[in-house]
Amino acid sequence: MKIAVFGASGTLGRAVVERLGQHHDIVTVGRNSGDYRADLTDIASVRAALAKIGPLDALIATAGQLHFGTLAETTPEQFQIGLNDKLLGQVNLVLVGQHVLNDGGSITLTSGIVSDEPIRYGSNATTVNAALDGFVSAAALELPRGLRINVVSPNVVVESWEGYGPYFAGYEPVPAARVALAYQRSVEGIQTGRVLRVW
Amino acid sequence: MKIAVFGASGTLGRAVVERLGQHHDIVTVGRNSGDYRADLTDIASVRAALAKIGPLDALIATAGQLHFGTLAETTPEQFQIGLNDKLLGQVNLVLVGQHVLNDGGSITLTSGIVSDEPIRYGSNATTVNAALDGFVSAAALELPRGLRINVVSPNVVVESWEGYGPYFAGYEPVPAARVALAYQRSVEGIQTGRVLRVW
């Protein structure tokens, strides 16, 4: 299969490329690096990148910014960071991707464990990840031509533990390579509309 | 208790005012009507209205716009309608309300059944309602001073059946007066972080 990975330079993206690259033709896409450049928050750039890449069997997004901070001090502008970046950015990929994927192709997005397990400073993250889990359940029912969509909801990953560990006291970090298996399961499997939890 | 209802002129809002008005002091707030004017998408107007209203025991939001349409034709701008209005609008009420409610007060938001049961044309609605259900689960854990927060997730209501019925084939509409009971349960009860489903 030919697969485009948006956010391929990130911790999860690199693990996904390593895993799926063993059996598939991978195209990497990023804001500032990769085979092609695109910013998921700019749908025109996504459309342009996918037009250049050509026919595809799978789209994967492992990119997205969130706001972390106390609810007491959060501003609407901070809350919008997650809504516009991690949420609408990945939705944008679906809005474009549904029209360019080959029949039977798939889209795999990324949410995170805090949709189900809220953490301190994480109200924006819980909201955005829950929104993505919900979006996928609805989008799966509307996609035409046998297209599928799933979302991987990873625990905090071992490779990000130094930065995120303090927020995840008592959580059991998972290796990014293990999370990458869920993307493979989504791409090569037959499920659709599913939240693939890696906890 | 003194309770402010944002969106008091809507179908649900009127039922909530009727129910809670039997035992409480209700202040109605709306974009274009009510005792006070405020637009939830404009946090400054929310802050100004609450400053004028003074000390409160409960805040209720029954307002919020969504986009309905096929996923195939949805644009990012359309998708943002629900994110900015029904989602961020109600989040704004929490961002301000947490600082002005009396100790032990409550906030009750409104999502909807499509967070769990997607409908045709409803990908924006599912996303936004799932986000609200998630937000409340996280916010409840951060609120200080015994403040509580819940979200009411109603089925389509009898009073809106004429407009929304075609989208909800096979659903069993519930009277707005029955949905209003869930707001009473949230305001007068002890739950927090809960999705109160009325299906």
Image (spheres, coloured by chain):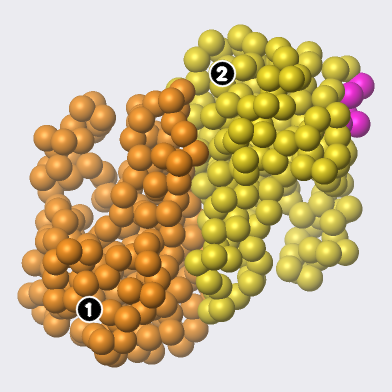
Chain colours: A orange, B yellow
The tag on residue A199 is none
Q: What residue type is labelled 2?
A: His
Q: How far apart are the alpha carbons under marks 2 and 1? A: 48 Å
Judging from the image, what secondary structure is the residue with disc 2 in?
helix
Would you say the residues marked 2 and 1 are in contact, meaning their CB atoms lie under 8 Å apart?
no
Judging from the image, what secondary structure is the residue with disc 1 in?
strand
Image position, residue B155 (x, y; %): 73, 51
Q: Is residue B59 above or below residue A184?
A: above
Most foreground residue, A51 or B42: B42
**Magenta run includes residue A184:** no
Image position, residue A19 (x, y; %): 11, 67
Q: Can residue A171 be seen in this view?
A: yes
The residue under the point 49% across, 56% down is A134
Q: What residue type is labelled 1?
A: Ile
Quadrant showing the N terminus of chain A: bottom left
Determine whether, in the image, residue A173 is placed left or right of residue B94: left
Magenta range is B16-22
The residue under the point 27% across, 70% down is A38
Q: Can residue A116 be seen in this view?
A: no
The residue under the point 16% across, 36% down is A163
Determine whether, in the image, residue A148 is placed left or right of residue B171: left
Most foreground residue, B145 or B173: B145
Determine whether, in the image, residue A155 is placed left or right of residue B15: left
Residue B193, quarter of picture: top right
Residue under label 2, please give it.
Answer: B99
Residue under label 1, please give it.
Answer: A3
> Mark 2 Cα within 10 Å, few/some/many (few <14, many 20+)?
few
Residue B14, quarter of picture: top right
